[in-house]
């Protein structure tokens, strides 16, 4: 900095000589630079460096101590889950990297929320500027929520014409459930056997992944997820996809007098083990739901925002026309914002006097974040990047599968990939999956495991992931599998 300031003083002196008639303008920066240089000289350059370093340390939680933090957390947040037997303590993120208080870096192969990369400057700036200008609720006119709704609508089939901006995927799915019941006059839902759609009372009921033993709400019927590797119908079989979809009929009929209001589908079947069935599955499921009079909710919370590598919304690859689309997690790159987009005639079934409003839903800051995310995805070509790097990574994983018998199956689209770990009898190797994720963490690579048996490694990095990052992941996984 001192060199930069000295240069400024020198350049100004030189310019003054060149343009004597315009000396005041030519020297306009000189006074400030000299004052700054004098201050540095007076304080001593080492002391200045120390003050800058101190200022950096004062950034929020930047130098937070790890010791004792876990115990403090467990005391006050007893039901808040943590990854890893040695939890990772993070204070900073940048792109695909996360940093602990000692500046050790971790490659983020797991988090879909920072879809455009951790702390993307455009999103950070959009949020900070809007927060500094106005942060109210949506009962006043403001352009951001309108612009966001218009932008979202433009990315979807035209009949999905009504947008509601909320704060979480759970809230959006919960609202979808209310609308489905109002619009159909029915009370029953169909979901896949290990689906996850949220935390609220209504969406927990739609989330078998999180049901307690024996828990199954009477108004929810489950169908087997389209797992062509482990489920009842296998990829090698003819029409296996259609056979899975055919279960919708029995499930819907099983709802009895309650009737079939809606089926919720995550097109990637993430919680069911990252299944990504061929698009015929969604087409067949939607066709059957329509014939049964039930609505289709496409839950894009996991698979959306370009992760599939072909479209912004993953259902679009199948050409189906869902009745409602739910988006969330990545929508604000970490700022809480989610949305539900529905056909307006469905919304009309909710009586006018019922106000659909949430205090923080669609606030200007959330909308600024969501708009910035959409802009970055487009400007940085992140859908195409998900396809390109995703397919490279998938190839690499398939190569590892040839060497490591622990890998039974590799599947996925774009940058949402699953690696199913199996024992000698092809049974699910959940214990190994846990060991692998722990060993990867020790090597500075973050991923997780999912699926009904917890034996599917879940690879779901920010969409700015590059080939070099894929190589780091592949190399570490190769080593870890070799020693498993
Ligand atoms: N739907 C799906 C498919 C999800 O994965 C999640 C969150 N993991 C949700 C809904 C719920 O979203 P949130 O946690 O934002 O409430």
Image (cartoon, grey):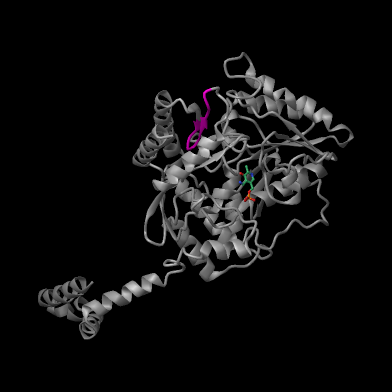
Image coordinates of residue 28 in percent, x first then y, are 23, 78
Residue 96 counted in the magenta span = no
Q: Between 24 and 461, which is closer to the camera in this rendering?
A: 461
Furthest residue toward top:
238
Q: What main secondary structure does the magenta stretch of the protein show?
A: strand
Considering only vertical position in the picture, is 287 above or below 322? above
Viewer-proximal residue, 461 or 441?
Answer: 441
Q: Quadrant of the N terminus?
A: bottom left
* Left-right relation of 351 to 319: right
Is residue 463 something that shows in the picture?
no
Judge from the rendering whether residue 77 lies leftward or rightward of residue 122; answer left or right: right
Quarter placement of the C terminus: top left
Q: Quadrant of residue 255?
A: top right
Note whether residue 222 is visible: yes
Residue at image position (56%, 34%) is 274
Residue 468 higher or lower than 45, as above or below: above
Q: Position of residue 465 (x, y in %)?
A: 41, 43
Vertical side of 207 occupied by 244: above or below: above
In the displayed structure image, the side of residue 195 where residue 54 appears, left or right? left
Residue 423 drawn in magenta: yes
Residue 364 in picture, x, y percent from top left: 58, 62
Figure disc tally: 0
Q: Residue at x 81, y 49 (%)?
A: 350
* The residue stretch that appears in magenta: 412-424
Q: Position of residue 296 (x, y in %)?
A: 71, 35
Task: Give the residue at the far right of this rendering.
Answer: 257
Is 479 on the left or on the right of 336, as rendered? left
Seen at 41% across and 23% down, the residue is 402
| Front-lying residue, 303 or 358 | 303
């Amino acid at each position: 900095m001192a060199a930069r300031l000295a240069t400024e003083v020198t350049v100004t002196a030189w310019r003054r000589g060149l343009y004597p008639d315009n000396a005041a303008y030519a020297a306009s920066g000189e006074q400030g630079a000299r004052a700054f240089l004098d201050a540095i000289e007076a304080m001593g350059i080492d002391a200045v460096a120390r003050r800058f370093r101190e200022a950096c340390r004062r950034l929020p939680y930047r130098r937070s101590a790890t010791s004792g933090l876990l115990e403090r957390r467990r005391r006050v947040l007893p039901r808040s889950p943590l990854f890893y037997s040695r939890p990772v303590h993070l204070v900073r993120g940048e792109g695909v990297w996360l940093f602990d208080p000692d500046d050790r870096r971790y490659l983020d192969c797991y988090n879909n929320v920072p879809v455009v990369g951790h702390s993307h400057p455009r999103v950070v700036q959009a949020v900070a500027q809007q927060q500094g200008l106005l942060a109210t609720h949506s009962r006043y006119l403001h352009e951001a929520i309108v612009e966001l709704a218009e932008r979202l609508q433009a990315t979807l089939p035209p009949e999905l014409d009504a947008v509601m901006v909320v704060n979480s995927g759970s809230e959006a799915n919960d609202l979808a459930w209310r609308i489905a019941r109002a619009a159909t006059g029915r009370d029953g839902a169909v979901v896949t056997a290990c689906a996850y759609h949220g935390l609220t009372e209504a969406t927990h009921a739609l989330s078998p992944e999180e049901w307690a033993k024996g828990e199954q709400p009477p108004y929810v019927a489950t169908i087997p997820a389209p797992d062509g590797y482990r489920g009842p119908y296998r990829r090698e079989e003819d029409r296996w996809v259609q056979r899975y979809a055919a279960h919708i009929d029995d499930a819907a009929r099983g709802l009895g007098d309650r009737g079939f209001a809606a089926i919720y589908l995550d097109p990637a079947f993430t919680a069911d083990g990252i299944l990504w069935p061929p698009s015929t599955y969604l087409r067949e499921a939607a066709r059957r739901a329509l014939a049964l009079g039930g609505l289709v909710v496409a839950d894009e919370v996991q698979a959306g925002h370009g992760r599939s590598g072909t479209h912004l919304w993953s259902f679009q690859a199948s050409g189906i026309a869902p009745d409602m689309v739910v988006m969330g997690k990545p929508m604000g790159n970490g700022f809480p914002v989610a949305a539900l987009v529905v056909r307006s005639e469905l919304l009309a079934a909710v009586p006018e006097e019922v106000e659909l409003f949430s205090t923080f839903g669609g606030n200007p800051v959330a909308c600024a974040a969501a708009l910035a995310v959409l802009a970055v995805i487009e400007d940085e070509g992140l859908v195409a990047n998900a396809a390109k790097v995703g397919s490279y990574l998938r190839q690499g994983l398939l190569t590892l599968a040839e060497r490591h018998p622990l890998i039974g199956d590799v599947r996925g689209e774009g940058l949402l990939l699953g690696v199913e770990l199996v024992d000698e009898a092809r049974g699910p190797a959940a214990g190994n999956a846990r060991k692998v994720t722990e060993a990867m963490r020790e090597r500075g690579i973050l991923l997780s495991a999912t699926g009904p048996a917890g034996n599917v490694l879940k690879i779901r990095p920010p969409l700015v992931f590059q080939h070099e990052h894929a190589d780091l992941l592949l190399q570490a996984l190769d080593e870890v599998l070799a020693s498993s």
